[in-house]
């Protein structure tokens, strides 16, 4: 960061404040509580963005986020030198176009060269650099300004997700605000100039568009376009998120339609049909993704997972690594054995006894809260009630299926708590939403019985 960043930051806060005033006046004229929550959540997310920038600047003293910004500035210099080639580079994913950009004299002498490892051909980092270069224009070519633009995108996406669930559970307006808008790790890791911020925001928008367009059937064409746009963005940057989302989203849609069938016999008969259709849709999409992008075929997924396991285990510092057993063992038996262990790692670790630095300490506190709340619900519900609640609520099913599937995938591949606390943010709000809804259903049943 530079003096320019310090000067530009108040300007961006002022612009966002003006936008928030206009948004609140337009949407929350008769809802003071909602307006107040919007302002607090927005300020929290912007503060998280600034905190993220400061931590990477002064605690880590570098990192990918500064590399992305350096490459975004290099793209600006490349555009000034050769606008035609720069525009071509933005839309051309060929190796030749990337090579021409990397070896341009103005790029070779830029501050981006120490981060050359980010610009491997075919990597999602190259796509993100292009996006960052465009957003950098909106950020007035400042690191803080560009980071705040990403934070605003992430916040508004979270707000859309919040409105989705509050519309279905208006009595939980306050309770749902915590898991969706105020989870500390999501606020911090989902607010900086990183792929995580963009993919998390895209996931929230995708969920909202899926519900509005395909379940409620409102503005179908518009929401279908959004579904395609945000799903494609996630596939380009972090495709494994989509692999976890597709089965959960498919079952969510079909369960919602199943529940609308009035005849109990037809509803019962529809379960295997809709389930088979959902499974078939899942494998069809996986096949199409594999054919079009290659890296999501079964063999490529195994190679990618092995690469993550080996690299993160090797890169573990200060004892931040963990292991689930045999690295590289993708046998069915080993995967089944590690499912509960990997899920536990993602949702409930690091434990306080595994903390080696300040960042992991904060993550451990958050994980402990999730663990204690989950144990409390388990004892409160006595398992059989818990199963009944899950089976009776399609929203809980959706949130649990996505969050647990995703938790397994990142827990199985990360092998490093430092990476895991960042990778796991897409599933944390959904898992927390499921816990809140289960708690609410338990209280409702208890009030009914008394």
Image (tube, grey):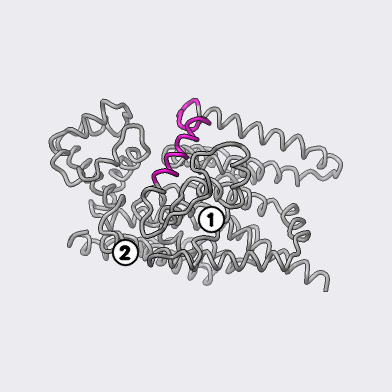
Q: Is residue 21 left or right of residue 349?
A: left
Observer-nearest residue: 384 or 352? 352
Tell me which segment is drawn in magenta: 291-311
Q: Is residue 55 left or right of residue 42?
A: left
- Judged from this view, the residue extending furthest toward the front is 326
Label 1 or label 2, whichever lies nearer to me, is 1
Residue drawn at x 31%, y 52% as measured from the top left: 65
Within the magenta stretch, is there residue 261?
no
Indicate the quadrant containing the C terminus: top left, top right, bottom left or bottom right: bottom right
Mark 2 = which residue? 13
Q: Is residue 304 left or right of residue 180?
A: left
Total labels: the figure holds 2
**Label 1 or label 2, whichever comes before in sequence order:** 2
* In the rendered image, the vertical position of residue 351 relative to residue 208, given as above or below: below
Mark 1 = which residue? 345
* In the rendered image, the vertical position of residue 336 relative to residue 5, given as above or below: above
Task: State the image coordinates of residue 287 (x, y, percent, origin top left).
Answer: 55, 28
Indicate the quadrant containing the N terminus: top left, top right, bottom left or bottom right: bottom left
Within the magenta stretch, is there residue 302?
yes
* In the rendered image, the vertical position of residue 37 relative to residue 76, given as above or below: below
């Amino acid at each position: 960061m530079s003096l320019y960043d310090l000067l530009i930051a108040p300007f961006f806060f002022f612009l966002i404040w003006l936008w928030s005033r206009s948004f609140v006046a337009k949407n929350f004229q008769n809802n003071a509580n909602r307006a107040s929550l919007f302002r607090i959540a927005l300020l929290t997310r912007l503060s998280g963005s600034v905190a993220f920038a400061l931590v990477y600047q002064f605690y880590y003293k570098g990192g990918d986020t500064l590399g992305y910004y350096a490459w975004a500035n290099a793209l600006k210099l490349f555009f000034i030198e050769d606008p035609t080639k720069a525009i071509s580079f933005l839309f051309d994913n060929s190796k030749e176009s990337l090579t021409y950009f990397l070896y341009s004299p103005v790029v070779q002498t830029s501050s981006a060269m120490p981060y050359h490892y980010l610009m491997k051909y075919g990597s999602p980092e190259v796509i993100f650099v292009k996006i960052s270069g465009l957003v950098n224009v909106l950020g007035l070519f400042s690191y803080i300004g560009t980071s705040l633009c990403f934070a605003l995108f992430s916040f508004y996406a979270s707000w859309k997700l919040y409105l989705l669930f509050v519309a279905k559970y208006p009595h939980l307006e306050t309770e749902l605000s915590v898991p969706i808008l105020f989870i500390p790790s999501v606020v911090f890791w989902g607010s900086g100039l990183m792929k995580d911020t963009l993919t998390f925001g895209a996931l929230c928008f995708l969920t909202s568009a899926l519900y509005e367009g395909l379940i409620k059937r409102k503005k179908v064409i518009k929401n279908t376009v959004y579904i395609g746009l945000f799903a494609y963005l996630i596939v380009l940057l972090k495709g494994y998120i989509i692999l976890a989302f597709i089965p959960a989203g498919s079952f969510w849609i079909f369960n919602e339609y199943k529940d609308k069938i009035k005849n109990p016999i037809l509803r019962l008969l529809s379960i295997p049909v809709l389930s088979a259709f959902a499974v078939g849709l899942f494998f069809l999409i996986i096949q199409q993704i594999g054919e079009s992008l290659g890296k999501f075929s079964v063999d490529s997924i195994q190679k990618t997972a092995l690469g993550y396991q080996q690299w993160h285990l090797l890169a573990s510092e200060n004892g931040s690594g963990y292991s689930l057993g045999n690295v590289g063992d993708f046998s069915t038996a080993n995967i089944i054995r590690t499912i509960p262990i990997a899920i536990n790692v993602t949702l409930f670790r690091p434990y306080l006894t595994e903390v080696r630095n300040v960042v992991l300490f904060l993550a451990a506190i958050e994980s402990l809260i999730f663990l204690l709340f989950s144990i409390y619900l388990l004892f409160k519900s006595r398992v059989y009630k818990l199963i009944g609640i899950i089976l009776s609520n399609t929203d809980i099913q959706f949130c649990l299926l996505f969050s647990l599937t995703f938790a397994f995938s990142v827990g199985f591949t990360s092998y490093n708590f430092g990476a895991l606390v960042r990778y796991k943010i897409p599933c944390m709000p959904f898992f927390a939403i499921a816990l809140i809804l289960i708690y609410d259903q338990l209280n409702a049943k208890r009030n009914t019985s008394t």
